[in-house]
Image (spheres, coloured by chain):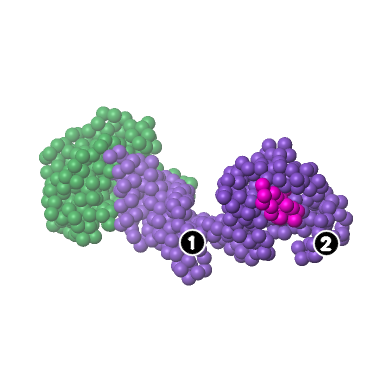
């Protein structure tokens, strides 16, 4: 075993022999690490909950509807305001960084689709390819619209499950050609069974075509019913919705005090508000843990300095028996790191217990990964190293003859 | 073994230099047991520190085993202390929280080379001072005489050429002191050079030669 390793091992033994002093030194850091790992475990649990909620309820979805803010509940006759256009969607996509996906949406009820001797009256939507991902829909068969379908104003369609069942009771919809508005449309895909929306809309009773096709061929009008978009950072969804609102007010040249000619609908997220509160609390706790970690480091440094002054005789004996100044430095630095790592381990274990207790009591969700422990140990090691540098240098600088003499006093 | 010529050493107190050694000269041959006597404050411990490279002189020359190490760095001096010199202090200077054998192994911790059978060497060193049976006891569990014998074993574990002892019997009763001096006698017989400082004439008489240190210098013609 090399001299360095012997000294490090000896330092570990020295820490183990002074249990009381070690515990006292490690306490502050252990507290900081306990808070840090609790916050990390709870944060990971929360993050997973957020993702579940986002996936389940589409909390990252913002809808912009044409018309004012009573649009949703207004009689149908009041709808159809020509206020949203494809350029608005493009502008949102290019100017707002937190917007990851955008699709314009047109729709028209009462359209008739025909295949051979079967016909259904349904609602037709004109959308862009990102729509599928924004709405988190999926296909049972075939494929969704592609970029070239938009560019080429292709006559292609994706059928809702119910429409597909009605037109193709025997199956085999994909690849078949239906007639829509009198024109032939090739069926590209069929949606999975989606059920009904909270508002009672039957999601399976619809046909989706490329937006360019609906605007220029099928409906023959440029204005949109909706723009749908997905945000990257769901925590900033409210801020992004406000940015959409501002952008559209500028684009639509709406003066101060004038009402919007559109309605931005963000998820009705009680969960979102709760998560924001949790996020604030988490930031606060992270700040507390940072303070505790720094304080823990200072405690270690001060107690190490105290230990150096109490162990002058020992330093003298070590120097007399052949220790170099660098050996003394290594010894004290190793002790500081070992103490800090012990604090890190104790803190992580405490954090784990606290996180589980919080979960059991229903106060917070927790999810255990390796990350908090790795972060805790790494942080502890770095703090131990930083806290040990000054005491170790001071110990190494003690003159051997004076150290021996002090022990004789 | 050692040849010191006109060693000077002073310490500063409140910026004022206090001379401690004022030209001390001495030689000690291989296998020689030399006692240095002097009153408190005569510079005995300072001289011993210079001879053991725990400190360096302000002026003068000191050759150890034929080598002048005045320009050597901390690492080189530490290596000499580790391999060639063993210290015995008045207050034993054992580490309280570890066992006797672990105390004896301390110099092996700082050995340059890989150490094999460190525990065995330490036990043999303890055996040489008659304390192998107390190897597992902590310093606090040993009598003063036993503690000093453990300290001697620690000084011997690296088989040094020179033993420097600073009032080694100063804290011991008469019998324990005599046992320690017997050990020094045997070590001298085994070929080790020993320099012992003391203010006790009875202790000094056990040496081959006695030198008197007065006001920082060896008194010429003081050898008895």
Q: Is residue A153 left or right of residue A342?
A: right
The quarter of the picture where residue A21 lies is bottom left
Discs 2 and 1 lie in a common subunit? yes
Answer few, some or many: residues within 10 Å of disc 2's Cα (few below 14, many 20 plus, some between 14 and 19).
few
Q: Does the rendering let one see residue A35?
A: no
Q: Is residue A126 left or right of residue A82?
A: left
Query: Of callouts 2 and 1, which one flags the residue occurring earlier in the amino acid sequence?
Result: 2
Q: Which residues are magenta?
A: A108-130
- For this rendering, which residue is in front, B162 or A206? A206
* Chain holding disc 2: A
Q: Which quarter of the rendered picture does the C terminus of chain B lie within?
A: top left
The mark tally for this picture is 2
Residue A39 image point, x, y percent = 51, 60
- For this rendering, which residue is in front, A135 or A164? A164
The quarter of the picture where residue B195 lies is top left
Q: Secondary structure at mark 2?
A: helix
Q: What residue would you read off at disc 2?
A: A77
Magenta-span inclusion, residue A360? no
Chain drawn purple in the picture:
A
Residue A187 image point, x, y percent = 64, 44
**CA distance separating discs 2 and 1:** 50 Å
């Amino acid at each position: 075993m090399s001299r360095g390793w012997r000294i490090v091992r000896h330092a570990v033994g020295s820490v183990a022999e002074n249990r009381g002093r070690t515990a006292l030194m490690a306490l502050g850091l252990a507290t900081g690490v306990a808070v840090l790992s609790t916050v990390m475990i709870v944060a990971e649990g929360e993050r997973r909950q957020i993702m579940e909620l986002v996936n389940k309820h589409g909390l990252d979805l913002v809808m912009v509807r044409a018309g004012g803010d009573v649009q949703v509940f207004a009689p149908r006759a009041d709808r159809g305001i020509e206020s949203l256009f494809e350029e608005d969607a493009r502008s949102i996509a290019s100017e707002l960084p937190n917007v990851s996906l955008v699709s314009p949406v047109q729709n028209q009820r009462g359209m008739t689709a025909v295949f051979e001797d079967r016909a259904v009256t349904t609602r037709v939507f004109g959308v862009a390819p990102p729509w599928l991902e924004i709405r988190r829909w999926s296909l049972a068969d075939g494929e969704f619209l592609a970029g070239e379908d938009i560019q080429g104003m292709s006559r292609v369609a994706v059928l809702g499950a119910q429409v597909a069942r009605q037109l193709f009771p025997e199956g085999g919809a994909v690849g078949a050609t239906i007639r829509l508005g009198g024109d032939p449309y090739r069926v590209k895909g069929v949606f999975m069974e989606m059920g009904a929306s909270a508002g009672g809309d039957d999601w399976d009773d619809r046909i989706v075509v490329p937006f360019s096709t609906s605007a220029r061929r099928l409906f023959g009008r440029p204005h949109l019913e909706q723009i749908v978009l997905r945000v990257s950072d769901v925590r900033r969804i409210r801020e992004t919705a406000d940015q959409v609102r501002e952008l559209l007010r500028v684009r639509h040249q709406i003066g101060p005090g004038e009402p919007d000619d559109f309605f931005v609908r963000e998820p009705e997220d009680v969960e979102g508000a709760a998560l924001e509160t949790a996020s604030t609390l988490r930031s606060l706790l992270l700040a507390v843990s940072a303070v505790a970690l720094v304080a823990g480091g200072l405690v270690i440094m001060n107690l190490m300095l105290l230990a150096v002054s109490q162990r002058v005789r020992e330093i003298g004996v070590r120097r007399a028996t052949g220790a170099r100044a660098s050996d003394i430095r290594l010894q004290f630095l190793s002790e500081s790191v070992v103490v800090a790592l012990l604090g890190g381990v104790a803190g992580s274990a405490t954090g784990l217990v606290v996180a589980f207790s919080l979960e059991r009591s229903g106060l917070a969700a927790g999810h255990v990964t390796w990350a908090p422990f790795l972060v805790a140990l790494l942080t502890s090691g770095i703090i131990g190293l930083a806290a040990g540098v000054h005491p170790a240098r001071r110990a190494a600088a003690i003159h051997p003859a004076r150290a021996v003499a002090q022990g004789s006093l | 073994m050692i040849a010191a010529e006109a060693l000077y050493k002073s310490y500063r107190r409140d910026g004022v230099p206090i001379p401690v050694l004022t030209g001390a000269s001495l030689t000690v041959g291989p296998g020689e047991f030399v006692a240095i006597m002097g009153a408190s404050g005569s510079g005995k411990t300072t001289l011993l520190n210079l001879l053991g490279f725990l400190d360096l002189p302000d002026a003068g020359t000191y050759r150890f085993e034929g080598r002048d190490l005045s320009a050597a760095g901390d690492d080189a001096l530490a290596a000499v202390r580790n391999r060639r010199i063993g210290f015995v202090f008045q207050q034993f200077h054992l580490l309280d929280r570890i066992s006797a054998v672990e105390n004896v192994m301390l110099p092996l911790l700082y050995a340059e080379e890989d150490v094999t059978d460190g525990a065995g060497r330490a036990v043999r060193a303890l055996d040489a001072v008659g304390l192998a049976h107390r190897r597992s006891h902590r310093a606090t569990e040993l009598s003063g005489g036993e503690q000093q014998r453990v300290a001697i074993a620690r000084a011997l574990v690296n088989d040094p050429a020179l033993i420097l002892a600073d009032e080694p019997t100063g804290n011991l009763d008469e019998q324990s002191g005599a046992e320690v001096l017997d050990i020094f006698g045997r070590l001298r017989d085994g070929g080790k050079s020993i320099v012992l400082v003391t203010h006790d004439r009875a202790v000094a008489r056990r040496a081959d030669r006695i030198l008197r240190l007065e006001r920082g210098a060896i008194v010429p013609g003081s050898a008895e």
